[in-house]
């Protein structure tokens, strides 16, 4: 066997995986807290900003993947992949993104005042009516498709058997946990910077859940450390690439996980006051770590192939 690093999936795909998983979970959580009226609050403003932010994230991420295609017309093969190749995760993921974006936007539209210059648009009126009449269907459809999208980003990598770093059950778990964590970090920034509503209980719950998620992510990454260290030559090569790089070690693991975990833990246990500045600093570190995770997971993907005869 011989091993070489892959270069086909570059930073464009890393942005797609990052914004795809995070944006989808931003929409899922925003829709869920609004639909369930968590803590007796309306949460409409948070839902509007969250769903629109998630929509933009998914749009940018999908555009990155489309730009990465050498043959842009080949996107039709991706869309038809659910029929031609049912085990193609990228095909299922593409459709889940499309439906999640559409349903989330339709659910959100009735809650946004119509600008005067668009008052004549019958199509907009129709979607607002449709989103009101079928609000429950749109909401739960958005949540389902968004959660599926977050899981899919990890399943996509897990489907490559030639790369030991990717081909294991821990990748979908790691990417899903990271997607939810970064989504909560995004929503906390929206709450403190844009919404500024009197929703302290919801903010505290977001901080608490994110603390548990970051702690879980630390444990999963530590498991990967020993899994790769004691694995095959393929895994050991990935281990050397990851832990030999200071951006992964200090940028992701220390600054993107350990530091925000300590900050969040201190806030939820009331060792330090929970204020907007500290929360935003922690959230930005989580977002930075979320991107570095995907970037370096792709970078450290080592292909294992037999020697040509």
Image: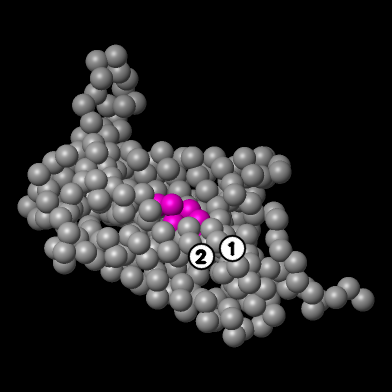
Residue ID at (50%, 44%): 61
- Left or right of 120? Residue 274 is left
Would you name the residue on which mark 1 appears?
A: 245
Instruction: Examine the rendered structure and indicate whether residue 56 appears above or below residue 177.
Output: above
Q: Is residue 217 visible?
A: yes
Total labels drawn: 2
Work out which residue is located at the far right of the displayed protein and give it: 309
Q: Residue at 46% of width from left, 76% of height from top?
A: 222
Q: How is the image coloured?
A: one colour
86 or 147: which is nearer to us? 147
Check the image and report above or below for 309 versus 265.
Answer: below
Instruction: Between residue 267 and residue 142, name the one nearer to us.
Output: 267
Where residue 177 sits, quadrant-wise, is bottom left
Residue 114: mark in rendering: none
Helix, strand or loop at mark 1? loop
Q: Residue furthest left?
A: 40
Viewport quadrant of the N terminus: bottom right
Say few, some or many: other residues with alpha carbon within 10 Å of mark 2 (under 14 / 14 to 19 / 20 or more).
Answer: some
**Chief secondary structure of the magenta span?**
helix
Residue plotted at (33% across, 60% down): 260
| Part of the protein shown in magenta | 287-294
Name the residue that disc number 2 marks.
249
Q: Would you say 81 lies left or right of 111 here?
A: right
* Callout 2–callout 1 Cβ contact below 8 Å: yes
Q: Secondary structure at mark 2?
A: helix
Please give left or right for residue 117 compared with residue 99 in the image.
left
Tell me if residue 272 comes above or below residue 123 in the rendering. below
Placement of 103 over or under 86, stated as above or below = above
């Amino acid at each position: 066997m011989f091993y070489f690093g892959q270069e086909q999936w570059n930073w464009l795909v890393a942005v797609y995986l990052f914004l795809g998983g995070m944006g989808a979970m931003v929409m899922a959580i925003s829709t869920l807290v609004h639909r369930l009226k968590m803590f007796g609050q309306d949460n409409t403003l948070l839902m509007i900003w969250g769903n629109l932010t998630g929509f933009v994230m998914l749009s940018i991420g999908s555009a990155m993947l489309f730009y990465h295609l050498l043959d842009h017309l080949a996107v039709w093969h991706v869309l038809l992949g659910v029929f031609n190749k049912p085990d193609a995760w990228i095909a299922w993921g593409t459709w889940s993104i499309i439906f999640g974006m559409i349903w989330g936007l339709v659910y959100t539209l009735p809650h946004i005042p119509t600008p005067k210059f668009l008052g004549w648009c019958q199509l907009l009126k129709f979607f607002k009516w449709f989103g009101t009449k079928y609000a429950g269907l749109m909401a739960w459809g958005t949540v389902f498709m968004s959660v599926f999208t977050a899981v899919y980003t990890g399943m996509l990598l897990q489907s490559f058997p030639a790369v030991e770093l990717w081909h294991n059950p821990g990748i979908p778990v790691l990417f899903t946990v990271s997607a939810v964590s970064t989504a909560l970090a995004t929503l906390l920034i929206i709450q403190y910077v844009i919404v500024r509503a009197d929703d302290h209980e919801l903010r505290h719950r977001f901080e608490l859940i994110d603390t548990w998620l970051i702690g879980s992510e630390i444990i999963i990454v530590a498991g990967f450390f020993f899994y790769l260290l004691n694995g095959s030559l393929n895994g050991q090569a990935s281990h050397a690439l990851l832990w030999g790089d200071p951006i992964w070690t200090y940028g992701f693991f220390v600054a993107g996980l350990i530091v925000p975990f300590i900050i969040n833990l201190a806030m939820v246990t009331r060792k330090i006051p929970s204020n907007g500045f500290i929360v935003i600093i922690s959230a930005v570190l989580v977002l930075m770590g979320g991107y570095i995770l995907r970037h370096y997971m792709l970078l450290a993907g080592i292909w294992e192939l037999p020697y040509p005869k």
